[in-house]
């Protein structure tokens, strides 16, 4: 069973909770963290779902910089987790 990917709004909330600072540019949002982690995410409609490639990029960055373990990153980037934590 495959979990559904987060929307841009949900991704923004997750990154904000992890201490990233968002800087909005013309066509993208740059997320920076004090430890040097950097993510560039295209600005699409807030309710649009991030692409599989974007999800892999975010997941790889969160694991590489030690924010989350691979399993935690997989869980955090799923909509089923977001829905369960919102309740």
Image (tube, rainbow, N blue to C red):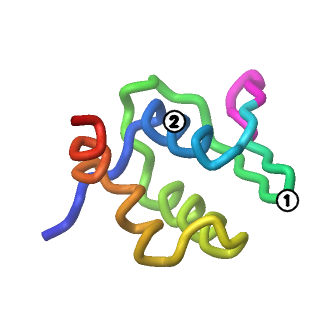
Coordinates of residue 83 in the picture (x, y in percent) = 24, 41
Q: Quadrant of residue 30?
A: top right
Q: Residue at x 28, y 52 (%)?
A: 81
Is there CB contact under 8 Å for labels 2 and 1? Answer: no
Asked if residue 33 is positioned above or below residue 71 in the image, the reply reads: above
Coordinates of residue 41 in the picture (x, y in percent) = 63, 42
Q: Residue at x 49, y 42 (%)?
A: 11
Coordinates of residue 43 in the picture (x, y in percent) = 59, 30
Q: Is residue 33 left or right of residue 50?
A: right
Q: Residue at x 51, y 28 (%)?
A: 44
Secondary structure mostly taken by the magenta-highlighted segment of the chain = strand
Q: Quick one: quadrant of the N terminus? A: bottom left
Secondary structure state at the residue bearing disc 2 = helix
Q: Is residue 48 left or right of residue 55?
A: left
**Span colored in magenta:** 23-30
Q: Give the residue number, with chain letter if any, for mark 1.
A: 35
Asked if residue 24 is positioned above or below residue 17 in the image, the reply reads: above
- Residue at the left extreme of this rendering: 1
Q: Tag count in the figure?
A: 2
Q: Give the residue number, with chain letter if any, for mark 2.
A: 13
Coordinates of residue 85 in the picture (x, y in percent) = 29, 44
**Residue sitting nearer the eye, 7 or 14:** 14
**Residue sitting nearer the eye, 38 or 18:** 18
């Amino acid at each position: 069973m495959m979990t559904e990917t987060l929307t841009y709004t949900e991704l923004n909330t997750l990154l904000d909770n992890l201490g990233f600072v968002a800087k909005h540019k013309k066509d993208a949002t740059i997320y920076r963290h004090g430890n040097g982690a950097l993510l560039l995410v295209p600005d699409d409609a807030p309710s649009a779902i991030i692409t599989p490639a974007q999800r892999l990029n975010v997941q790889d960055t969160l694991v590489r910089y030690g924010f989350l373990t691979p399993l935690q990153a997989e869980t955090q980037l799923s909509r089923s987790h977001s829905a369960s934590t919102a309740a």
